[in-house]
């Protein structure tokens, strides 16, 4: 609970006292996952420095980097990537960190993951990709390619135009 709530002094005391740093609860959630989910960068740094498994996955395959990417916690994403997190690790559905960041419109996270070498076209099990999730229900843009018959429609959502422009650079 200390990791979940960002209580860095309590985390340090428990780690120093020998607490099992990667102990998972029934769903596979670890202290690092909880700190990453809630954007507690100081706790993330402490756990990583103390030897926490960076890519330890929950039963669903979600990892600390996945949940930080989903929630737009850019500082946590940067820390985990710098500490060696697997950039293209996929969850049980095949979703990647880049896909979930794109789906949630987190442009800073998308930029960081792409700059760190994330596979742009990595698909989840249904065949969808980060570009697919860079779309939704609002404005429609038709883009024509070099062939007169080549055309695709992208439906844009909050902040997704910026994501699409970044991916197409």
Image (tube, rainbow, N blue to C red):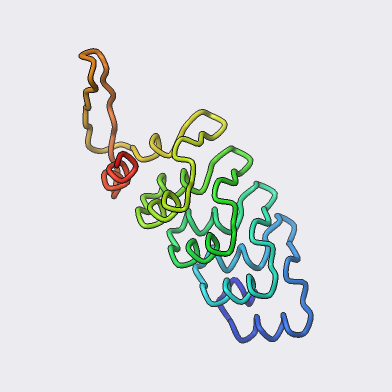
Q: Position of residue 62 (x, y in %)?
A: 61, 51
The residue depicted at 46 percent of the width and 46 percent of the height is 98
- Residue drawn 45% across and 63% down? 73
Across and down, in percent, residue 19 comes to 77, 77
Whether residue 142 sits left or right of residue 45 in the image: it is left
Quadrant position of residue 29: bottom right
Give the quarter of the image for residue 108.
bottom left
In the rendering, at what x and y percent does residue 42 appear? 53, 77
Is 121 positioned to the left or the right of 43 in the image? left
In screen coordinates, is 88 left or right of 14? Answer: left
Query: In the current view of this chain or complex, which residue is farthest to the top?
Result: 149
Compared to residue 83, the image places residue 28 above or below, namely above
The residue drawn where x is 20% and y is 14% is 148
Residue 159 relative to residue 20: left or right: left
- Check the picture and name the quadrant holding the C terminus: top left
Q: Quadrant of the N terminus?
A: bottom right
Quadrant of residue 75 within the rendered picture: bottom left
Using the image as rendered, state which of residue 35 and residue 53 is in the foreground.
53
Name the residue located 52 percent from the left edge and 66 percent from the top edge. Answer: 79
The front one of 143 and 104 is 143
Vertical placement of residue 79 versus 124, above or below: below
Above or below, 22 against 141 in this view is: below
Q: In this orientation, which residue lies closer to the viewer: 34 or 52?
A: 52
Query: How many discs mark residues in the rendered view?
Result: 0
């Amino acid at each position: 609970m200390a990791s979940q709530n960002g209580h860095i002094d309590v985390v340090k005391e428990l780690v120093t006292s020998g607490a099992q740093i990667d102990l998972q609860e029934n769903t596979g959630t670890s202290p690092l996952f909880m700190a990453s989910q809630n954007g507690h960068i100081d706790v993330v740094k402490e756990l990583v420095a103390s030897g926490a498994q960076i890519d330890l996955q929950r039963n669903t395959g979600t990892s600390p980097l996945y949940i930080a990417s989903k929630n737009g916690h850019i500082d946590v994403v940067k820390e985990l990537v710098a500490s060696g997190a697997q950039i293209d690790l996929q969850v049980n559905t095949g979703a990647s960190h880049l896909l979930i960041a794109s789906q949630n419109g987190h442009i800073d996270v998308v930029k960081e993951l792409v700059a760190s070498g994330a596979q742009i076209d990595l698909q989840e099990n249904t065949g969808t990709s980060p570009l697919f999730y860079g779309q939704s229900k609002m404005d429609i843009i038709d883009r024509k390619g070099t062939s007169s018959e080549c055309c695709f429609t992208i439906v844009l959502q909050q902040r997704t135009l910026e994501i699409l422009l970044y991916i197409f650079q």
